[in-house]
Amino acid sequence: MSSFSGRRQQRSGPHRAAVREEPALARSQEFLSLARTDSGTFEALFPGTVPQAQAQTVLEQLDAEYTRLVQERVYEQVVERAQQQGLALESERVEEDNSIVLTLRVEQSG
């Protein structure tokens, strides 16, 4: 078996990499289990039969999906809070890097 943490490679134990974020990620699949570390990150464990490139791909996909879900939730919170503060969403634009630019307008109170 071999292991890895980010780009640094080690030669013993199952494949490992730190995945930062929330407990919702702590799901098991046939070839993947996640465990929270003492530092609050998650450690992804793959059996030694999973090639390192496949394990890295899975972690990259997991990170991309998590990032998308966080962005979606933050977007919803920003729009909700803006409305609570009397601001209206005038426009939004998704950039090439998938960041979102919001233009808010102050609504006139009657």
Image (cartoon, rainbow, N blue to C red):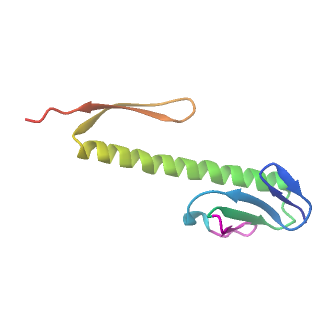
Q: Position of residue 38 (x, y in %)?
A: 66, 69
Taking depth in this image into account, of 55 and 9 the one nearest to the observer is 9
Q: Is residue 57 magenta?
A: no
Residue 18 left/right relative to 54? left
Could you tell me what secondary structure mostly forms the magenta stretch?
loop
Q: Position of residue 26 (x, y in %)?
A: 61, 67
Residue 11 left/right relative to 50? right
Residue 42 left/right relative to 88? right
Q: Is residue 31 magenta?
A: yes
Task: Please report the residue visible at 87 percent of the width from the left and 65 percent of the height from the top.
Answer: 49
Toward which corner of the image does residue 78 lie, by quadrant? top left
Q: Quadrant of the N terminus?
A: bottom right
**As displayed, is residue 78 above or below residue 24?**
above
Q: Position of residue 99 (x, y in %)?
A: 51, 35
Task: Please report the residue visible at 87 percent of the width from the left and 54 percent of the height from the top.
Answer: 9
Task: Please report the residue visible at 78 percent of the width from the left and 61 percent of the height from the top.
Answer: 16
Q: Which residues are magenta?
A: 27-39
Taking depth in this image into account, of 51 and 110 the one nearest to the observer is 110
Q: Quadrant of the C terminus?
A: top left
